[in-house]
Image: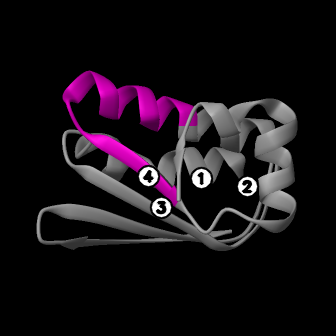
Amino acid sequence: MNIEINERNGSYYGILTGWIDTAVATQFLEDLKPLMNHANKSIILDCEKLEYICSLGLRGLLKLKKESAAKGGSLVLTHVDGEVLKIFTMTGFIKLFDIR
């Protein structure tokens, strides 16, 4: 699992890569902290290279979404497909996120 975060024009872009499973979920939650600090901005997470996400990873994304909503920011997930799309669909998370 890797998350690369960049700031451009006042928005924050993250690229998620690999597997977010229980072995790395704690690190993933830590890696999301810089985005939590900027939750008042537009945050876009590219999931094209994300191969899997576990329930703890989903919880981290939900927490980021709630923080963004509370601070007047936004969270968009892009390129959610394959196995990750199946997980979002089965868990009902597909209805909770702005997915493009």
Q: Amino acid at mark 3?
A: Leu
Q: Which residue is the site of mark 1?
A: 28
Residue at 23%, 46% in the rendered image: 38
Query: Is 25 one of the magenta-colored residues?
Result: no
Looking at the picture, tell me which residue is in the foreground, 35 or 94: 94
| Earlier sequence position, callout 2 versus callout 3 | 2
Find out whether the residues at labels 4 and 1 contact each other: C-beta distance under 8 Å. no
Find out whether the residues at labels 1 and 2 contact each other: C-beta distance under 8 Å. yes
Find out whether the residues at labels 4 and 3 contact each other: C-beta distance under 8 Å. yes
Find out whether the residues at labels 4 and 2 contact each other: C-beta distance under 8 Å. no
| Residue 24 circle label | 2
Q: Position of residue 6 (x, y in %)?
A: 30, 73
Q: CA distance from mark 4 to mark 2?
A: 22 Å
Disc 1 element:
helix
Q: Which residue is the site of mark 4?
A: 76
- Nearer to us of marks 4 and 1 is 4
